[in-house]
Image (cartoon, grey):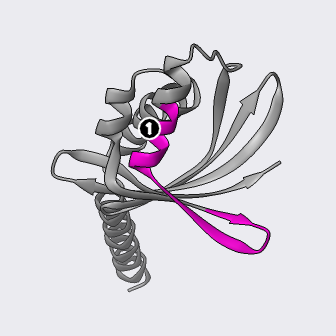
């Protein structure tokens, strides 16, 4: 009798563990985290911050993206079109900003929604902590929103 109870318990635990693994893999498909990091690096860090390939920026940001900031207790908004235009102007003027690098602190994916926390660094100094929101569309992940803290 004890052997049957032990075997039944092991079977139930195995089924529970297998179900949990299946749910986890559905919530975060393999490769999504790497795709999100690559998108942020190309579209945001290399494109906007380092005045790089703005076509990659256009491809990586949803057209309705908005950057929300807090200045003097007031919420500010910067649509992606305005941000890209400002970056194009700086790039055309020949500005060469110090290289910006990023450190990914957290990538949290649930289904077709994701949140990324990262730090931006220039000349060895942490300058921003960013929180980027993304959605997965039929053509891939897109950055849809951002809030930040300036250090």
Residue 54, how many percent across, how many down? 38, 28
Using residue 15 as the reference point, say whether residue 42 is left or right of it.
Answer: right
Question: Does the segment drawn in magenta span residue 79?
Answer: yes
Using residue 103 as the reference point, say whether residue 110 is left or right of it.
Answer: left
Q: Nearer the viewer, residue 90 or 114?
A: 90
Residue at point 47% right, 20% down? 52
Mark 1: secondary structure: helix
Q: Nearer the viewer, residue 53 or 134?
A: 53
Q: Nearer the viewer, residue 102 or 106?
A: 102
Q: Dot 1 corresponds to which residue?
A: 85
Residue 47, how many percent across, how many down? 47, 28
In the displayed structure, would residue 125 be above or below residue 97? below
- The outermost residue toward the bottom is 1
Q: Quadrant of residue 99?
A: top right
Residue at point 32% right, 38% down? 58
Residue 129 can be seen, yes or no = yes
Using residue 120 as the reference point, say whether residue 107 is left or right of it.
Answer: left
Binning the other alpha carbons within 10 Å of mark 1 as few (below 14), some (14 to 19) or many (20 upward) gives few
Q: Quadrant of residue 3?
A: bottom left
- The outermost residue toward the left is 138
Residue 31 can be seen, yes or no = no
Residue 79, how many percent across, how many down? 44, 55
Question: Does the segment drawn in magenta span residue 12?
Answer: no
Which residue range is magenta in the image?
69-87
Q: Quadrant of residue 59?
A: top left
**Across the whole image, how many numbered discs are drawn on residues?**
1
Q: Nearer the viewer, residue 13 or 80?
A: 80
Residue 1, how many percent across, how many down? 38, 86
Residue at point 31% right, 69% down? 19
Residue at point 39% right, 66% down? 17
């Amino acid at each position: 009798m004890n052997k049957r109870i032990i075997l039944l318990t092991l079977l139930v635990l195995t089924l529970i563990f297998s179900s949990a693994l299946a749910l986890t893999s559905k919530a975060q498909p393999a490769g999504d985290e790497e795709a999100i990091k690559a998108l942020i690096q190309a579209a945001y860090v290399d494109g906007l911050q380092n005045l790089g390939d703005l076509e990659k920026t256009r491809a990586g940001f949803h057209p309705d993206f908005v950057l929300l900031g807090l200045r003097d207790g007031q919420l500010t908004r910067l649509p992606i079109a305005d941000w890209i235009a400002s970056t194009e102007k700086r790039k055309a003027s020949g500005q060469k900003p110090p290289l910006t690098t990023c450190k990914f602190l957290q990538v949290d994916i649930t289904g077709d929604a994701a949140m990324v926390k990262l730090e931006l660094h220039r000349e060895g100094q942490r300058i921003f902590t960013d929180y980027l929101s993304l959605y997965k569309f039929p053509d891939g992940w897109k950055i849809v929103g951002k809030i930040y803290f300036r250090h």
